[in-house]
Image: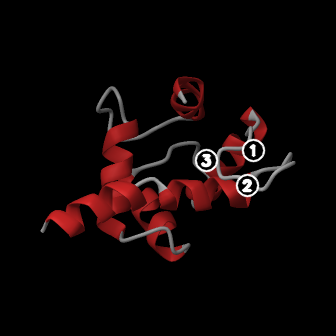
Amino acid sequence: DEFKTGFGNILGPLPFGVMFLRYFSVNDTGDYDEYMTNEDFGRIFNEIDTNADGFVVSEETSAFYSNNGYGSASLGNTWFQAIDYYNFGNLTIAGWEEVFNAL
């Protein structure tokens, strides 16, 4: 139990690092914490918004997360719940940019 908890804490941010690496347009070092532009972050929003209606919902985030190998659909849903600050049940590009600015 102690090992699983510790290992989980270490690997917890890994899927986000992998996701961000795939979207960097400026990458000097290859490190997961390299600078990401607002445009790069916006590309993630556009890829998640599969029906291109300008809103990201939990189902889209879950599918994006699991289909791209970042983790399970339930983890994608948990991620959506964390970034849906106002509990609207959807996220617009303006809300997405708030997440970017918070990072």
Residue 33 vs residue 63, the one in the foreground = 33
Please give the residue where the numbered disc 2 appears in the rendered image.
23
* Residue 49 seen anywhere in this rendered image of the structure: no
Residue at 55% in and 34% down:
96
Residue type for callout 2: Tyr
Q: CA distance from mark 1 to mark 2?
A: 6 Å
* Residue at left offset 52%, top offset 54%: 16
Three-letter amino acid code at the position of disc 3: Phe
Q: Residue at x 32, y 26 (%)?
A: 86
Q: CA distance from mark 1 to mark 3?
A: 9 Å
Residues at badges 3 and 2 in contact (C-beta under 8 Å)?
no
Find residue 40 and name its label: 1
- Of the 4 image quadrants, the one containing the N terminus is bottom left
Labels 1 and 2: the sequence-earlier one: 2
Q: Is residue 33 above or below residue 19?
A: above
Callouts 1 and 2 close, C-beta under 8 Å: yes
- The answer to whether 80 is drawn above or below residue 12 in the figure is above
Nearest the camera: 5 or 75?
5
Residue 15 shows in this picture: yes
Q: Which residue is mark 3?
A: 45
Rendered location of residue 64, percent (x, y): 51, 65
In what element is the residue under mark 2? helix
Q: Is the C terminus in the top left, top right, bottom left or bottom right quadrant?
A: top right
